[in-house]
Amino acid sequence: MHSTSDAPAAVESRLGDPADMTATERGHHNYALRQDLGRGRMRAVILCSSSFLSDGPRPGLQFIAQGMAREGWDVRYISAPSSLFDFPLHSKRGRFHRAWLQNRSHDPVQIEPNLREYIFRSPVPVDRRFLRYPWQVAHYRSMAPRWLREERFDLCIHDSSPALLYRPLVRAQHHILRLSDTIEGFSHFGPPVVNAFHEGLRAGAYSAAWAVTHGLLEYGRERQPNLPGVIIPNGVEVERFIPQRTAHRQPNSAVYIGSRGTWVDLELLAAAARRLPAWHFDIYGPLRPTPSTSAPNVKFHGRVPYHAVPEILSAYQVGLIPFRDVCGRLLVCERPLKFYQYLAAGLGVAATDVGGLRAGMGPWAHFGNDADHFAQAIVTSRASAAGRDQAATRRFVESHSWSSRLRDVKRSLAAFFPSAYAAAISHTVSFVPA
């Protein structure tokens, strides 16, 4: 076992504390839980493509893994595998070295006490260019280490990512599906990944779903009728995004930070920018300008490390969510993670009125679907943010912190492991009726 020095020193500070309590309160609250978990050493496997060792956005399963580990669970976190195709790519070479040269399938990286990350090997990358045929799945799974098949676990959790291909190998008392998105929302996943996701639901493989929205829970139940479910939305790292000092915001400034996707309407953003020539718009992420997404006052900055995002946001007045619905994907999207980040950072929010965005964000955002109305939403949201009650905003954001979400996770786990959680949880969560 390698020491915690193998993991970046920023891992701990990046993810924050999973409870809104003082250290003494937290110790008393969790003492009985740790005692019960420690006796039986409850064990969990969490399958998620994102690595703790990367500096990208943190998916919900990383916070859940960390919260469970801090309460005494023995958590084995399995991130995306590495293939030989990773070696030539600078951005993936570290993962290649960990999987192929450091044998992280068996010798994991210790992220913190009770939490270890494993990186398996795979024959080919898991995107649709390479993983295309059903017969490839058996070869993909065959490269998983024997311990994954042979050991028994109390719990297996995975999300809508290629790591779900390992789920049939895991012998766990309960399997939980973290529904943070539809599988169809990821156009780069090949048919084997999509089919495995649907097959697991049709086979009734899950004891419950932890869905980000009611729409996603219904999406799961269309495939596994009567699927027990709990709504556990994504959270926000409150202290990371609330400015620690007075923010010096650029006048007439708007920002978008996000990933590449067909649902990002950069054409609308550019058209609105042309109507606001006194403003400047900055776009961060793996997005490139095209003739239709360019404007004199729009600048593309490329990728930025996740730890730099709060500082970047503090320099702007308005955060943008220019989404468009593609194949009904946004019907299940209510509050994108960037919505919480924008609010915590003190920005106004301008968004398109598609899918569940208006229902989810409500009066905290302003909406427009064409260039004129989106431009107006940008101007209005700046004024709204300037007059916002900061204490009320902080209360709202804190109510959606990961600390709050982890309490919901704990209550859900108490429904499956009542003896372990009886001393720490006064009541269990109510599952959403099917």
Image (spheres, rainbow, N blue to C red):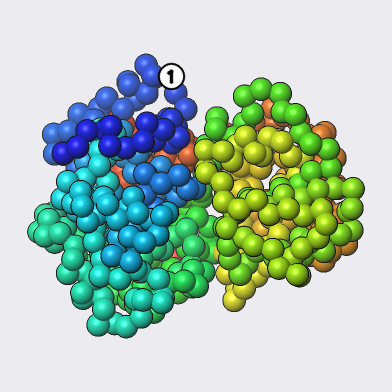
Write down the quadrant of residue 161 in the picture: bottom left
Residue toward you, 201 or 382: 382
From the image, which quarter does the C terminus lie in?
bottom left
**Pick the front one: 92 or 70:** 92
- Nearest to the observer: residue 407 or residue 194: 194
Task: Give residue 396's position: percent from left, percent from top.
Answer: 63, 36
Q: Quadrant of residue 269?
A: bottom right
Could you tell me residue 369's position as x and y percent? 79, 65
Residue at the location (41% across, 55% down)? 90
- Answer whether residue 431 is visible to the viewer in this image: no
Q: Position of residue 109 (x, y in %)?
A: 25, 42
Residue lying at 81% horizontally and 60% vertically, measured from the top left: 295
Could you tell me which residue is drawn at 22 percent across and 33 percent down?
Answer: 3
- Horizontal side of 83 relative to 107 (left or right) equals right
Q: Secondary structure at mark 1?
A: loop
283 versus 38 height, above or below: below
- Quarter of the image with the N terminus in it: top left
Residue at which label 1 appears: 22
Report the amino acid beneath label 1: Thr
Q: Residue at x 72, y 49 (%)?
A: 282
Q: Is residue 259 visible?
A: yes
